[in-house]
Amino acid sequence: MSFLWVAAEGICALSANKLRNFLMMLGMIVGVALLAVIMAVGKGTQQKVIKRVDTWPIRVIKVNAGGGKGYTRPQAGVATLKLEDADAIRDRIRGWDLMLCVAEKRGLPMKFGSRQCQADVFAVEPTYCEMQSWPVQEGEEIGTEDIRTMARVCVVGTTLAKTLFGEDNPIGEYIYIGKVRFRVKGILKSRGIGPGGTDSDNRALIPLTTGMRRLFNQGYISYVRVRMKSVAAVPNAVKTIRQLLRKRHHISPPETDDFSIVTAKQIAEVARGISRTLTAVLVALAGLSLLVGGVVMMNILLISVAERTKEIGLRRALGATQHAILVQFLTEALSVTLIGMTLGAALGWSVSVALRRYTPVITETAWEPFALVIPFALLFGVAFGVHPARRAARLHPVEAMR
Amino acid sequence: MIELEAVEKAYGSGSTEALVLKGISFRVEAGEYVAIMGASGTGKTTLLNILGCLDKPTGGHYRLEDTDVVSLDDDALSHLRNRKIGFVFQMFHLLERTKALKNVMLPLIYAEEYPDDAEERAKKALTSVGLADRIQYKPGELSGGQQQRVAIARALITDPAIVLADEPTGNLDRRSGLEVLAIFRRLQQEGRTIIVVTHDQAVAEHAGRILLLSDGAIAHDRPVAEPRDAEAELASLPKEDRR
Ligand SMILES: Nc1ncnc2c1ncn2[C@@H]1O[C@H](COP(=O)(O)OP(=O)(O)OP(=O)(O)O)[C@@H](O)[C@H]1O
Ligand SMILES: [Mg+2]
């Protein structure tokens, strides 16, 4: 028996009934396309995470007001974190080289002349620009003197500057934040869209003291950033800060923290955890659709065997061994899975590209689905093709030809 | 060539067992042209299936060219069918969506080695049954007689020693039937063994010997003194009837 010619018979059978073969392939197409998209999204997300993790300065510890797990922002209106806490940290932690306290309020009304808008206001210490590696492009930063005198001065982001001043130079002008008048003394460099999807340039920086006493009228801050001299010092510092704050806030087990500590390592873990769960769910979905596709294919093949009983009998009568019939139908199943899965991978590729182009979903098209097609097609083709193929092979020639 | 000894065939088992062939013995020498006759349901097809190694007897012995067929396994039987036997079925049994040429080539796929000249051979076989101009036609585009001749060409493609035909003219008009019988005569002259099942006395008389089957046993086994000549009968048909 010539294996190749028998296999060719199986492939020839494919072109005979196009609708049926399309139906057989559908499950494979959908399943693999889904897998390909998942991989692309997974890869895209991973790269985004890596970027995020990369931009997080590894020596920095952020202490947010308000509890919660994982990478949380400071919770608005939570009054647990005080300047005294920051002072305590300053005194107790060894090995830090930069500290920054920030009180933030999002979406405050801004006004210049008749122009109005909303922007995020950050009441900061002079260390802000260095800590955030975010210098001014024009004018001056918030200085020590501003803090001491509770000066009503501000540094604006480029978006805010543009909204209020258009093309005019804002430096030296006076704007209203809420009901308080501030003199613009600097413009921050542009940073674009932040990781949360908000415009980081739509902001104003004001002195911490001015912010707390004159604008926000509050005794608490939003977060403290501590930059250690070395990465190695971070874990111990985190431990000390946690113990210190729990003691200061009179928190004892089983009560949970009323603050949260964020480090580079933690961000990486959380991000990885999220993408892992997401991937697991989606992979399960894709697997399910592949499984359903496999079962559909098996049933259509069984119908096909039943319909072609006479043909199978004839082939047997003309000298086809059981093995030859088995090979023919397995080839048919394998072709269906192989073609279906290749189409699926191509479809997944196209969808990934379309997602990247027309939606905010970040995808990174992967070559892996194409490489996986062959082992997957083999696996599914054999797993779901062997039963119909054996049924075909076991037909008795005389009975089958009746 | 062919030797049957007390061959039995029973269908079913236990209380529903039905003995269809009840001890059949005969020999067919190489190059013989034999017709098997009998009423409907007497076991002609059953016997032919056994002769063609499509089915095994439930009793007795069957020797084909010194091979004990009863002892062979399924694979060996398949190979034997492919190499030694050419089948012509009553209902043609052609692949509908497949062109005549491919239909004829089908047995070669299952040959031990696929010949390089497969297509040439198929064309030659089709030419020999007078269908040289119908090579690319599908069965649905052919007449019954033409379909039967495609089926004969398919039976001949492996150059079998034995050609078995079950009611090869049953579905054909007189002219097509005679054309088929003329081909059989030529095959016999080439030295092949021909066994034809028919219920038509006139068809049977083209053979050199007639076996009459009755109730699963051989009732008569007699030679035909003067076999009919299909070629001559074709020539004597009215002219306008000719294609
Ligand atoms: N697979 C089977 N199972 C049970 N009985 C069968 C089977 N095949 C054939 N028979 C029985 O065996 C007997 C002979 O059948 P067979 O087909 O050989 O007859 P036949 O001589 O070819 O008849 P016909 O001239 O009508 O074709 C019939 O009575 C039939 O019912
Ligand atoms: Mg019959």
Image: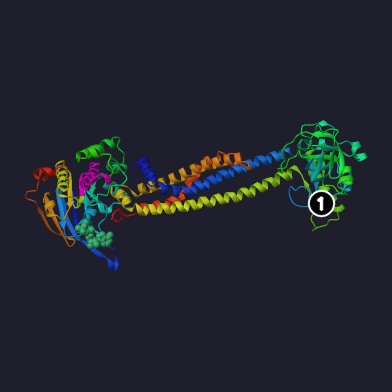
- Pointer 1 local density, CA inside 10 Å: few below 14, some 14–19, many at least 20: some
Judging depth in this view, the residue of A222 and A336 nearest the camera is A222
In terms of image quadrants, where is residue A177? Answer: top right
Residue type at mark 1: give it: Gly
At 76% from the left and 35% from the top, the residue drawn is A162
Helix or strand or loop: what does disc 1 sit on? loop
Q: Where A69 sits versus A188, above or below?
A: below
Q: Which residues are magenta?
A: B140-164
- Provide residue A161's location: percent of width, then percent of height: 78, 36
Q: Which residue is mark 1?
A: A77
- Provide residue B86's location: percent of width, then percent of height: 23, 46
Residue lying at the far front of the rendered structure: A114
In this picture, residue A171 sits left or right of residue B192: right
Q: Where does the N terminus of chain A fall, quadrant-wise?
A: top left
At 63% from the left and 49% from the top, the residue drawn is A278
- Provide residue B22's location: percent of width, then percent of height: 20, 62
